[in-house]
Image: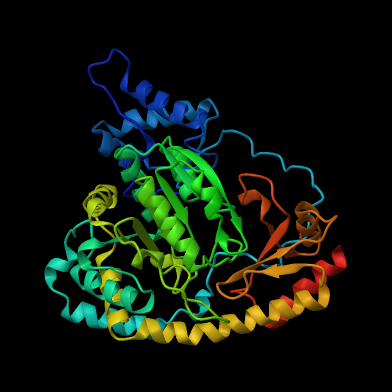
């Protein structure tokens, strides 16, 4: 579609300027600026130029000078003009030729994507009530620049929730509000690197786009610690020389292992012995189905553990709300880094979430969602047993996904490709490993209803 101009367009829109002290005539300067814009593609084919009177007024020259420039460019073929109409760009790069058709897989119709909540269940009415309340009663100064820690209301409500539900040892003085986990881990790595950290240990497998990516960007060496059925292998950890460990003890990502009490004590012992920091990603901890909730590791060692949480899997990732609970020795540096990064997270969203917590709406929302996700988890287990019984599910007791280990002779790429040919999206564990390991697939179920889950597994089985 051609770009159009209004009477408010200015010479700045064309990047046209005139220099009255130059030896070049004014109309030549205008010609040159427009000609260059067309040649570089900045003024695309079909774009309308401002009327001569408008451009002349903006440049502070007579209309005749602009008319002369336009006429010259029309004569050269760069512009076209007709009486009573716009002057338009008549030359420019040819439209790219369409690429020859290539054979492709059908679009993904049933996607077992992971790492997402079902945002269709976002509690809009309850959130709106919280927004209305805080807009009515919040002090005016809450809408100014906040500290790097967060608004006072959330710094009170959030530790109360974490201590009650997750067994944390949080206080307003040790809490920092962030824009989700991604920013939280970025701030942690930034602060640790500034304090002299040189090596960070991560679970293997683990996500490659959060801790690992930020550590590499900060110049830190990343080492992997193998994961077993119950989470990180503490025997292998003992041999790791690192300044920090990023761990998901309550629901290992992606295998779903839960770190037992003895292993948790071993992790904290390793941190004390090595003067290291443990970063606890409390991934999917709110959704447990077949066993009692497991408390946060931070509650056992608040002087060594940085606890990281988020609303991305419980409410919606679009809220961009997360938090860190840090040892007193680190919290000031984290708050300063947050302040320098963006001057603080949205005050309105923080206030609304504080009210949402204080009125028990967060607890009610989680109670509503647990049976929804459990039914989908059960449907996935049933579909695997019916269609792909040789796949071995693991990590099924909690979260929004499970891992299915593949039988001998079947590799991840083969299954992923077969799924795509059938319009089914599945994802391998391999891309998240630092060292080779057994092949497996990650099946997310949070956004799929039971009939779609069964259909997807049936299509995948038929394609293999």
The vertical placement of 269 against 22, above or below, is: below
Q: Position of residue 289 (x, y in %)?
A: 56, 81
Q: Position of residue 205 (x, y in %)?
A: 59, 53
Q: Nearer the viewer, residue 140 or 172?
A: 172
Q: Quadrant location of the C terminus?
A: bottom right
The vertical placement of 270 against 137, above or below, is: above
Q: Residue at x 77, y 52 (%)?
A: 413
Q: Nearer the viewer, residue 312 or 412?
A: 412
| In this rendering, position of residue 69 left or right of residue 408 | left
| In this rendering, position of residue 341 left or right of residue 382 | left
Q: Position of residue 318 (x, y in %)?
A: 43, 66
Q: Residue at x 45, y 62 (%)?
A: 264
- Identify the image's colour scheme: rainbow, by chain, secondary structure or one colour: rainbow
The vertical placement of 127 against 337, above or below, is: below
Picture quadrant of residue 231 = bottom right
The vertical placement of 432 against 122, above or below, is: above
Q: Nearer the viewer, residue 395 or 68?
A: 395
């Amino acid at each position: 579609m051609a770009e159009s101009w209004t009477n408010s367009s200015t010479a700045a829109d064309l990047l046209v300027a005139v220099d009255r002290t130059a030896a070049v005539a004014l109309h030549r300067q205008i010609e040159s600026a427009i000609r260059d814009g067309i040649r570089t593609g900045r003024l695309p084919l079909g774009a309308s130029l401002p009327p001569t009177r408008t451009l002349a007024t903006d440049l502070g020259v007579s209309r005749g000078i602009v008319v002369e420039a336009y006429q010259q460019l029309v004569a050269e073929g760069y512009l076209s003009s007709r009486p009573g109409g716009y002057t338009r760009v008549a030359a420019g790069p040819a439209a790219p030729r369409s690429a020859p058709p290539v054979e492709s897989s059908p679009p993904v119709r049933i996607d077992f994507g992971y790492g997402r909540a079902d945002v269709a269940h976002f509690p809009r009415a309850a959130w709106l009530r919280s927004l209305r309340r805080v807009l009515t009663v919040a002090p005016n100064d809450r809408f100014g620049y906040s500290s790097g820690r967060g608004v006072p209301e959330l710094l009170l409500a959030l530790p109360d929730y974490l201590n009650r539900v997750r067994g944390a040892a949080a206080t307003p003085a040790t809490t920092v509000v962030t824009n989700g986990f991604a920013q939280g881990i970025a701030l942690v790595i930034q602060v640790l690197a500034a304090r002299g950290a040189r090596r960070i240990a991560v679970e293997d497998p683990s996500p490659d786009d959060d801790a690992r990516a930020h550590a590499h960007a900060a110049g830190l060496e990343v080492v992997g610690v193998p994961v077993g059925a119950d989470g990180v292998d503490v025997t292998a950890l003992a041999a790791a020389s690192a300044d920090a460990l990023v761990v998901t003890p309550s629901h290992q990502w992606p295998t779903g292992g839960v770190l037992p009490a003895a292993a948790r004590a071993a992790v904290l012992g390793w941190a004390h012995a090595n003067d290291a920091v443990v970063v606890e990603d409390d991934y999917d901890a709110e959704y447990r189905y077949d066993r009692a909730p497991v408390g946060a590791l931070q509650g056992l060692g608040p002087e060594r553990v940085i606890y990281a949480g988020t609303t991305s899997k419980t409410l919606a990732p679009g809220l961009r709300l997360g938090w860190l609970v840090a040892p007193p020795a680190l919290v000031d540096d984290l708050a300063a880094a947050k302040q320098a990064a963006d001057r603080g997270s949205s005050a309105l969203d923080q206030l609304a979430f504080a009210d949402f917590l204080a009125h028990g709406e967060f607890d009610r929302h989680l109670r509503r969602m647990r049976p929804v996700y459990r039914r989908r988890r059960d449907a996935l287990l049933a579909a695997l047993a019916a269609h792909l019984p040789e796949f071995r599910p693991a990590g099924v007791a909690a979260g929004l996904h499970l891992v299915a280990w593949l039988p001998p002779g079947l590799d991840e790429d083969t299954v992923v490709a077969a799924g795509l040919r059938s319009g089914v999206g599945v994802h391998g564990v391999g891309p998240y490993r630092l060292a080779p390991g057994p092949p497996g697939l990650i099946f997310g179920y949070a956004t799929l209803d039971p009939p779609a889950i069964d259909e997807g597994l049936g299509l995948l089985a038929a394609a293999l």
